């Protein structure tokens, strides 16, 4: 026979909710989240930022890739509480003033997105690469380094050639 839920179990649930403070796409965020929620769950289901895709929930596909303090991470693998005080960027934070980001334009021109499911994660991994190259003062890019940067992102539609070309084109166009 199932016992009715007691006030103690309700109290336990409320104790497992924590206030989370971080920067999201350049804006401060403060919200209460369940301690066991992943960053992906907070982004999609609490903040309604659905550009970050829920794919495998195991870190295999990269569809949920976001930038955490500039580094690409699988948001399905980290607890939301781990980004306390961090700067998180999602695909929604790429464009400025309604204008597409150079990577988004390059993906469009190259035909790099087919079904589009992997595209947000690809864009965020590519953004991390291009930001790192800018910080180092690099002047060129090669396909092997783009492929390495995107190696954690799976695409079932394109065969990657157009994606790799789009990232290279975005780099060259921004130079």
Image: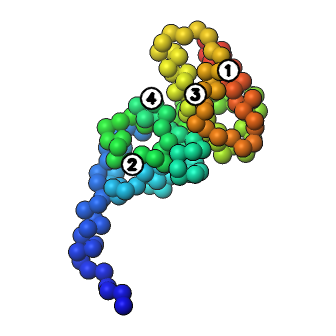
Query: Could you classify mark 3 by the number of other residues whose Cα lies within 10 Å: few (under 14), some (14-19), or many (20 or more)?
Result: some
The C terminus is located in which quarter?
A: top right
Q: Position of residue 102 (x, y in %)?
A: 63, 25
Query: Which mark's residue is nearer the viewer, 1 or 4?
Result: 1
In this rendering, does residue 28 appear at all? no
Label drawn at residue 79? 2
Q: Position of residue 12 (x, y in %)?
A: 26, 68
Q: Nearer the viewer, residue 100 or 151?
A: 151
Q: Are marks 1 and 4 in contact (CB under 8 Å)?
A: no
* Residue 113, quarter of the rendered image: top right
Query: Could you classify mark 2 by the number of other residues whose Cα lies within 10 Å: few (under 14), some (14-19), or many (20 or more)?
Result: some
Give the mark nearer the N terminus: 3 vs 4. Answer: 4
Q: Are marks 3 and 1 in contact (CB under 8 Å)?
A: no
Q: Which residue is mark 1?
A: 143
Q: Image check: 138 left or right of 111?
A: left
Residues at marks 2 and 4, CA–CA distance in whole angstroms: 17 Å
The N terminus is located in which quarter?
A: bottom left
Label drawn at residue 149? 3
Q: Which residue is mark 4?
A: 70
Q: Secondary structure at mark 3?
A: helix
């Amino acid at each position: 026979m199932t016992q009715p839920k007691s006030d103690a179990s309700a109290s336990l649930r409320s104790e497992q909710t924590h206030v989370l403070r971080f920067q999201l796409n350049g804006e401060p965020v403060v919200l209460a989240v369940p301690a066991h929620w992943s960053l992906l769950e907070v982004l999609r289901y609490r903040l309604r930022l659905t550009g970050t895709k829920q794919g495998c929930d195991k870190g295999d596909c990269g569809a949920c890739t976001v930038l955490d303090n500039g580094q690409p991470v699988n948001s399905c693998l980290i607890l939301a509480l781990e980004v306390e005080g961090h700067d998180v960027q999602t695909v929604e934070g790429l464009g400025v003033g309604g204008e597409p980001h150079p990577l988004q334009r390059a993906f469009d021109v190259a035909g790099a997105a087919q079904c589009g499911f992997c595209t947000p994660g690809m864009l965020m991994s590519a953004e991390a690469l291009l930001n790192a190259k800018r910080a180092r003062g690099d002047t060129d890019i090669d396909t092997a380094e783009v492929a390495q940067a995107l190696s954690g992102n799976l695409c079932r539609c394109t065969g990657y050639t157009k994606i790799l070309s789009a990232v290279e084109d975005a780099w060259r166009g921004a130079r």
